Amino acid sequence: MSAEKTAAEIVQAYDGRPIRVMEVCGTHTHAIFEHGIRNMLPDNIQLISGPGCPVCVTETGFIDEAVWLALEKNVTITTFGDLVRIPGTEMSLAGARAKGAKIRIVYSPLDAVNYASEHPETNVVFLSVGFETTVPAACLAVKRAMELGIRNFSLLTANKTMDRAYRVLKGSADAFLYPGHVSAVTGMKIYEELKNEGISGVVCGFTAGEILTALAMIVKKIGSGEPFAENAYTRVVTEEGMPIGRKLIEEIMEPCEAAWRGIGVIEGSGLKLREKYAACDARLVYDMPEIQGRPNPACRCGDVLMGRIKPYECPLFGKVCTTEHPVGACMVSSEGTCSAYYKYNI
Ligand code: SF4
């Protein structure tokens, strides 16, 4: 029998100072619950769920913009399913659909381009909400639409990049579990830069073994007191990441300030279409006025996303707010922290 300890044994044997580890990715949050990992941890390792779900960190005003386009400009909104039930100030997109708005679920931005091509009689807007993982596909859709001369297709963007968010979150945790799929695009360079600024973390996959391995790497490194940037997901994440995807983003989009639910505005953390692609920018195409959303003041999504409270500390959790009748984005999204706590009955 091997004398080498398993990752689980290393984590369970940790007897150092209390540490807080933030899993910034909603898929990690759900996987951690699914595999019962929280229950395996000693008391001195605290897992905090962070803001790593693009739908959850999208401000209420974005939903209001989409509703405005659907109801005032009569466009066909194309989107992934989660966004349809996110509450806006007055209504969700599902509510707008009940009032006659055209809302269509698609499985990729290219589906939306194809729909626009096949339906020249309607204007089609795709809701581009994502991190580095999904933004290249939205960029590809814009490129395809421009190449094919499809003029009835545009994007409403609320894209974000994670690196500046880590800097804002510095101090919220001793180490991050970095998201595997975002890291597949970014590569390891951004984490080396974060390390140089005193921010530690390990890139983490999504199986129980990969999560425990990442946690074991954290507990082994944390004692030194030195910042670290490690990769526990080497079967997918390489040093250089995906240069083709980053080049595509660079070509089509440029950084802009972005409002994060719970965090606030972070300069340079958003991605909007470059001027060259203005013909595909829904805000410009439809001369959209400034729309300020008003989130439900009773919803504590912002505090949940910052790791300040657990979902069950929100007075609405499980009573007024459930996955069947969600009040906030964190309960709607399949990657949301509140939906994870509710689904796994925490
Ligand atoms: S339980 Fe519902 S209302 Fe409370 S923070 Fe979560 S999503 Fe918002």
Image (spheres, grey):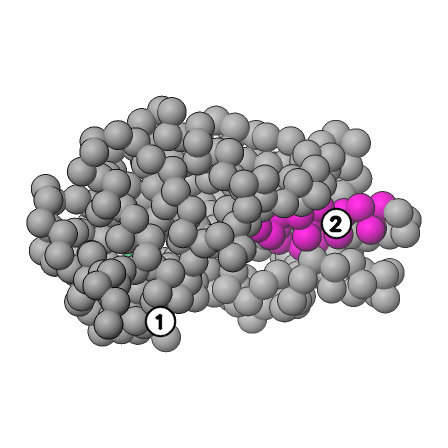
Return the residue at label 2. 140
Q: Is residue 232 visible?
A: yes
Please tell me in which quadrant of the rendered image residue 275 appears.
Answer: top right
Q: Residue at x 85, y 45 (%)?
A: 146
Residue 232 falls left or right of residue 320: right
Q: Position of residue 104 (x, y in %)?
A: 66, 67
Residues at marks 1 and 2 touching, judged by CB atoms closer than 8 Å: no
| Relative image position of residue 82 (x, y in whole percent) | 50, 64
Task: Estimate the spatial distance between the alpha carbons at disc 1 and disc 2, rounded to whole Å.
Answer: 33 Å
Q: Nearer the viewer, residue 40 or 297?
A: 40
Left or right of 311? Residue 279 is right
**Ligand 1 sits in quadrant:** bottom left
Compare residues 290 and 215 and report the one nearer the observer.
Answer: 215
Residue 29 point in image, percent of width and height = 33, 60
Mark 2: few/some/many CA within 10 Å (<14, 14-19, 20+):
some
Which tag, 1 or 2, sits closer to the chain's start?
A: 2
Amino acid type, callout 1: Thr
Does 131 lie within the magenta span? yes
Q: Nearer the viewer, mark 1 or mark 2?
A: 2
Quadrant in the picture for the C terminus: bottom left
